[in-house]
Image (cartoon, helix red, strand yellow):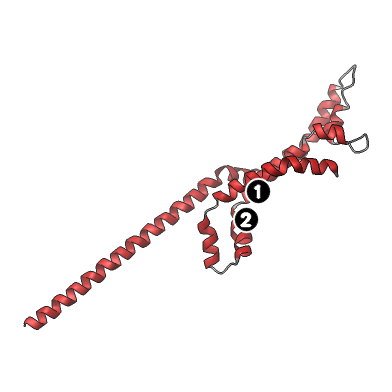
Amino acid sequence: GGLVRTCLTFSLPFSIWMLIGYFESVPRELDEAATVDGCGPLGALFRVVVPAATPGIVAVGVYSFMTAWGEVLFASVMTNDTTRTLSIGLQSYATQNDVYWNQVMAASLVVSVPVVAGFLLLQRHLVLARFGDLRFEAAHLGLQRLRRLLRLTRQHTRFLHERVVGLLAARQLAGQAV
């Protein structure tokens, strides 16, 4: 229990800091669009913002797992022979007089298998975490183009309205003159 709290104490602040940065990169327009579509605040969060931030959440999860998996300092102090972690177990292959290199290499391979398997399973999300900002930037540019198009449409509509009003006024004047 104490080792879990210690790992949380060190990884949680950095994880929160990373997530804040990633959630701030999610465009506010997505949240506003979900609200316009009828989602409440929690619905917008869980249906729109969290799926958009999934790559960042996965990256933070991988970071937290890696720091906890390879933690040696606190595990060497807070565990005993029956509760030691894998990284501390690797140290037992080195004695004062000898290092059992064959056993160390075999155990290192076994210890690294879950980490490699996790990376292979989450690789797609990690790539999205790296290039996700580009996707949001593209969505933001798309919204800017849409706004520009709406502004041009409004200007064109005003121009047409003024033109039609001008033509009607000219016809009325022409009809009165005849």
| Amino acid, disc 1 | Ile
- In the rendered structure, the answer to whether residue 62 lies left or right of residue 52 reads right
| Amino acid, disc 2 | Val
**Residue under numbered circle 1:** 57
Residue 51 is drawn in which quadrant?
A: bottom right
Circles 2 and 1, Cβ within 8 Å, touching? The answer is: yes
Please, what secondary structure does the residue beneath circle 1 have? helix
Please, what secondary structure does the residue beneath circle 2 have? helix
- In the rendered structure, the answer to whether residue 25 lies left or right of residue 42 reads left
Hey, which residue is sitting farthest right in the picture? 82
Tell me how far mark 2 sits from mark 1, CA to CA: 8 Å
Determine the residue positioned at 90% across, 18% down.
Answer: 96
Residue 120 appears in the figure: no
- In the rendered structure, the answer to whether residue 175 lies left or right of residue 133 reads left
Determine the residue positioned at 59% across, 47% down.
Answer: 22
**Residue under numbered circle 2:** 50
Q: Nearer the viewer, residue 110 or 31?
A: 31
